[in-house]
Image (cartoon, coloured by chain):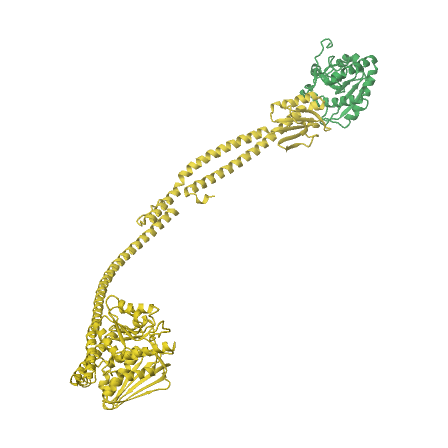
Amino acid sequence: MPIIVPRDKAIMRVLRPIIAMGICLSLALGASAQTLDSSDSSEYLIKAGFIYNFAKLVGWPQGAFAQPDSPIVIGILGTDPFGGIIDRILADKQIDARRFVIKRLKWGMDLKGCDILFIGSSEAAHLEEVIHALKGLPILTIGETPGFARRGCIINLVVEDNKVRFEVNLDAAKQADLNISSRLLALARIIPQSAAETR
Amino acid sequence: MNLQNLSIKGKLILITMLTSSAALVLSSASFLIYDLISFRHLLTLDLMTQAQIIGYNSAAAMAFRDEAAATATLSALTAKEDIVAAVLYSPDGTIFAHYFPNANAHPSTLPGRSQENGYRFESGYLEVFRDVTLNGERVGTLFLQSDQRQWSERARRYSAIVGIFVLFSGLFALLVSSQLQRLISRPILHLENAMRMVSTNKNYEVRATRFYSDEIGRLINGFNTMLSEIQQRDTALQRANDELKTRTRELEGEIIHRKQTQEELLKAKHAAEDASRAKSAFLANMSHELRTPLNAIIGYSEMLEEETRDSGKLENQQDLQKIQSAGKHLLSLINDVLDLSKIEAGKMGLHLETFDVSLMVEEMVTTLQPAIAKNANNVRVRLADDLGMMRADATKVRQILFNLMSNACKFTDHGTIALDVSQSAMEGQEWIRFRVKDTGIGISAKQQEKLFQEFSQADATISRKYGGTGLGLAISYRFVQMMKGRISVESQPGQGSTFTVYLPAQVTLDTTETAQLEGTGGAPAASAQRKAELDTILVIDDDPAVRDLMSRFLSKLGFRAVAAAGGEEGLRLAREVNPLVITLDVIMPECDGWDVLRKLKSDPSLAQIPVIMVTVVDNQAMGFDLGASNYLIKPVDRDRLAMLIEKHRVARSSTLTESKGPSRPAATREGRPIDMEVSRRS
């Protein structure tokens, strides 16, 4: 369920009823909300850029990459909300000597070859299983569904006040042996691991 | 600006002060500028470092478009007071986040868009642009603007410090230089002082003290050398001066001595002049004193002789004639002596008048008649046709001729005496020549040598035989000289003598002599206001003897004599009787003859009456000046007096009858009895 964290901004006060109405509408429509989101290409442009930036500010442990120029593999699990956007954005990007490789994955496929795994909203039902499957592996998990971070996803993108923000689960990052830059953390909302979901 | 007239002291201090202050200010300023430049560099580096840090810290926020985080990062600049603006630009150039510490900050001054990396100074502000990168990728641009508060504060503080430093060091320099300037100014002031002492007190003993052996020291040395030279010269001058003074004193003494001598000489001269004056006075007195009694002697002897002749007492007549002759001789002697003494005293003046030479000669010959007759001589007078008027002293010319002629008569017996008068031109001048030639005893060459000297007759025996004073030729010679003429003689004993006299036709006076009035011979009456008493003659004389003699003489001539004993009485009688002629004496008590003459001539009713001066005073010039017609000197030559009166009578009667006739003035002449028998007029 999307939650609204109101910010103390004048604009927000004006926009609040509209957004609330929008949220109610999306709640009412249910599944059709995904379609709406994906059609908003600017949101996913930003999110694709975020994923690129996360790659810059996250340190993988030694040995995570076979070679210095080994590509960073990004896996998109479940329904792909990006369309071709992420491929286009990352096509000519590289961090140090590493390029990007995008893979479209389905639940049940081997997820261990990824360095970054974007877990789509469609996987919310079995998120814990995915997290569990990846336990101990240096894979940066990124979600875009409210509550994902609490449930063990390392980074979860949220939209607040029409802006994309993100939550970080430091425990999850520590378990994955990923070093998240303090500069990134300074911008994130730190979410503690929920005891119930840490099974 | 009177900077040039400042004292040396002042100048030195000023120079030191200016130099040190200038150096100080320059060095301080350059130091300050250097410091400020390097400080600004430092500030720039600092700001750039700041920008780097802020850029690093805000890179993630930029990357994740977290405006709040970026703003928070910028807010860290609060500690930096000099930052007035901090702005983050997105890669597309729009403002992403900004920070203005002051509420009144001016976003308007911000650059609208991001710019190249680097720093710049823009209107007092230091601005820095810096790219914000994340893992080498530019995610935005940071802009920092500093007002350089530290820099300007530092500049202000440093300037104040430098100012105070300069002020204090200036004061210190003043202190030091005012002490040190004495090194230079003290010797100069000392020298100046010494110079003033020399110039005001004229004290050349002063010497300036030499302090150091620098240029001023050498100057002082030179000054001292100069002074000693001056002193030396001054001393020499003083010595010379003293010597001069001594000499001057000697000279003064000599001058005084000479002055004394001069005074003595002057005294001697005065004494001599006094003596001369006394002599002249004596002679004048003598002439008066001698002539007065002679007057009486001659006059009365003439009267007696006439009376004796009338009564036929012939035995007495001879004696009386001798008395008369002796008296006249004595008189002529006295006259000659007086003339000579007058000439010698330089008191004999020329009385120039224009006269007819022929007339004068004829008149002279007439008066000479008795002398001619005495030795039965034959006189022949030859006058040139072209003889005209002559300008000379007529009396003296007549006397010269008379002397020559009477001499010729005297020394010639039964012979011929020839008088030639002619006119000729010589040496660019007209001359009248008189030549008297006789057939007498002649003069030897030896005698001729001293012929014209005083008291020299050719022979001592001559005076016994022929009589005479021997002064006649001497006087004639002097008279000729006075008139700038010449006299010469040619003679041989026994062959007769020839005397030749040349006189200028126009005798001129020396310029120093004052021009004398021409004898006019008395103005004949232009119109008689009343009928003159043609037979009345007024005699004015204080001497009763003269009055008596004149009266008797005039009565004989057929005139009525009216006598007055004094001037006032004479004037009164003149008005009463309106006489034909007045005879006037000069020396009278109370009112003298000159006064009477002046009064007569100033009274219109009396002015026309001719006045004949009859006196012993020999001053014809005065008489003629005052208007006298004739001048006779006592004792009176009766013939001459008679002739003059007759002339006046004829002139008056013609004037009265024919109103005014052409009458020539009566030839005047000093009537002077000469050694001859006066022919009597009955």
Task: Kindly tell me whether residue B507 is visible in this rendering.
Answer: no
State which quadrant residue B102 falls in. top right
Question: Could you say which chain is coloured green in the image?
Answer: A
Q: Closer to the camera, B379 or A180?
A: B379
Where does the image place residue B103, in percent across and percent down from the top left?
A: 64, 23
In this figure, what is the number of numbered marks?
0
Task: Kindly tell me whether residue B194 is visible in this rendering.
Answer: yes
Q: Closer to the camera, A158 or B102?
A: B102
Q: In this view, does A168 lie above or below B242?
A: above
Q: In the shown orientation, is residue B140 left or right of residue B345?
A: right
Where does the image place residue A15, in percent across and percent down from the top left?
A: 76, 17
State which quadrant residue A10 falls in. top right
Where does the image place residue A55, in percent across and percent down from the top left?
A: 72, 22
Where does the image place residue B454, in percent across and percent down from the top left?
A: 22, 79
Q: Closer to the camera, B476 or A183?
A: B476
Query: The C terminus of chain B is located in which quarter?
Result: bottom left
Question: Could you say which chain is coloured yellow in the image?
Answer: B
Q: In this view, does B66 lie above or below B198?
A: above
Q: Is residue B22 above or below residue B398?
A: above
Q: Closer to the camera, B168 or B79?
A: B168
Q: In the shown orientation, is residue B642 left or right of residue B654?
A: left
Judged from this view, the residue extending furthest toward the top is: A196
